[in-house]
């Protein structure tokens, strides 16, 4: 599937510092299969910002990676060699990011991550052309671990899929969780039957469960968990409680706490405007994926106004300034080009007929990431 748009408008032509050349952006994201809602929200949030800016100097080419690393690599090669893009973005899954990003940055491309941010690209594998606008993979899970400690949980069962983001998730949770582990399990990526894992939870003696299962995996687990009769508190990251998952799961998710760097009720002007504009255009509430896509586009536009994308050092500096109004409020980059931002605790609630989240606490303030010291760029 290919989606192309040429943003309209000429306002930036008068800016003395603006880049004079057209900037071509290649977005590789998941638009089909079990993770489609994540990529669709990423695309829609990104394009909302591009369209609202009314630009004639930015072209965006969008392709579906089908959640397959080999497809993502093929698309990246096409975009770099045939489409001659300047910037890549959009990958949701960390295994796909690891297949694409190192090669792209080695060829001089800029990569702006709307979501996937594996530890390997934050530490020794960092690159001056790679910016994660979302987080570092561990961050939301670190916030969940800090919350589990604050909530007094002493024996938590933890579970995630066996791929880079899943491994980062359990590492992050354990970094700030001070209790014991009743069990630690890696599931298959894309798994939909969790009977065996729920049986392990039941027999483990746990007093709580932390899980990271994005997209359709989270829907399957939450429904099966609710039907199982296991009555232990659940804690997870926002990825397991986004808008699409909540509508599919329904009442079984009510009251569950989850960690996030963003929420639709975060109190700042940029976020209020974003939520209203997204809902008006797409007739649904935005998710964290849409919010990150929106911020990524606005970061890119802010850099285009300051520097030529063909001048690596100048464009790196322009991105590093993060001179845009983030929907997350306070936002800046750490030395390894990953965000410094708050991590919040949200609770699943129901507003009318819609299941959504509200912020109930702050788990971590101005968190950077654990890998800054390993980055030597």
Image (spheres, rainbow, N blue to C red):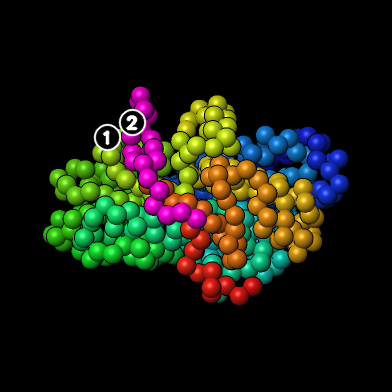
Left or right: 346 with respect to 315? left
Residue 122 occupies quadrant = bottom right
Q: Residue at x 26, y 43 (%)?
A: 223
Q: Which mark is residue 251?
A: 1
Task: Tell me residue 118's x, y (percent).
Answer: 49, 64
Q: Is residue 245 magenta?
A: no
Q: Is residue 185 visible?
A: no
* Residue 304 spot, x, y in % from top left: 75, 50
The answer to whether residue 8 is seen in the rendering is yes
Name which quarter of the figure residue 15 lies in: top right
Of pointers 2 and 1, the one earlier in the residue sequence = 1
Q: Are marks 2 and 1 in contact (CB under 8 Å)?
A: yes
Q: Which mark, by number, is residue 360?
A: none
Considering depth in this image, is 258 or 95 the residue closer to the camera?
Answer: 258
Residue beneath disc 2: 350
Magenta stretch: helix, strand or loop mostly:
strand
**Identity of the residue drawn at 39% across and 63% down:** 172
Locate residue 232, reporting x and y percent.
19, 50
Who's the residue at 50% across and 69% down the image? 371
| Magenta residues (range) | 346-366
Question: Is 315 rendered above or below residue 220?
Answer: below
SS at mark 1 in the image = helix
Quadrant including the C terminus = bottom right
């Amino acid at each position: 599937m290919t989606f192309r748009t040429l943003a309209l408008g000429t306002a930036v032509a008068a800016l003395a510092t603006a880049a004079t050349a057209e900037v071509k952006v290649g977005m590789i994201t998941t638009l089909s299969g079990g993770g489609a809602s994540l990529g669709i929200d990423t695309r829609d949030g990104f394009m909302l910002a591009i369209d609202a800016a009314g630009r004639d100097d930015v072209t965006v080419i969008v392709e579906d990676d089908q959640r397959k690393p080999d497809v993502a690599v093929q698309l990246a090669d096409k975009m770099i060699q045939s489409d001659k893009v300047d910037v890549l973005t959009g990958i949701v899954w960390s295994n796909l990011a690891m297949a694409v990003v190192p090669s792209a940055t080695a060829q001089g491309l800029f990569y702006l991550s709307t979501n996937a941010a594996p530890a390997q690209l934050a530490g020794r594998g960092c690159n001056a052309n790679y910016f994660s606008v979302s987080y570092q993979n561990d961050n939301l899970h670190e916030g969940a671990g800090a919350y589990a400690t604050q909530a007094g949980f002493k024996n938590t069962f933890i579970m995630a899929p066996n791929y880079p983001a899943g491994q980062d998730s359990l590492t992050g949770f354990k970094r700030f969780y001070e209790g014991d582990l009743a069990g630690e399990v890696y599931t298959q990526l894309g798994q939909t039957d969790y009977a065996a894992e729920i049986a392990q939870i039941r027999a483990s003696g746990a007093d709580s469960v932390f899980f990271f299962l994005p997209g359709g995996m989270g829907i399957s687990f939450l429904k099966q968990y609710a039907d199982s009769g296991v009555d232990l508190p659940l804690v997870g990251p926002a990825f397991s409680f986004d808008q699409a998952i909540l509508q599919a799961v329904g009442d079984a998710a009510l009251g569950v706490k989850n960690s996030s760097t963003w929420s639709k009720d975060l109190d700042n002007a940029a976020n209020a405007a974003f939520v209203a504009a997204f809902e008006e255009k797409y007739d649904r509430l935005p998710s964290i994926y849409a919010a990150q896509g929106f911020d990524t586009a606005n970061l890119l536009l802010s850099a285009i106004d300051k520097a030529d994308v063909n001048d690596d050092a100048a464009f790196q500096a322009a991105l590093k300034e993060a001179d845009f109004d983030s929907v997350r409020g306070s936002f800046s980059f750490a030395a390894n080009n990953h965000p410094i931002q708050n991590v919040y605790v949200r609770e699943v609630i129901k507003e009318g007929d819609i299941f959504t989240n509200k912020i109930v606490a702050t788990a971590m303030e101005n968190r950077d990431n654990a890998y800054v010291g390993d980055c030597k760029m």
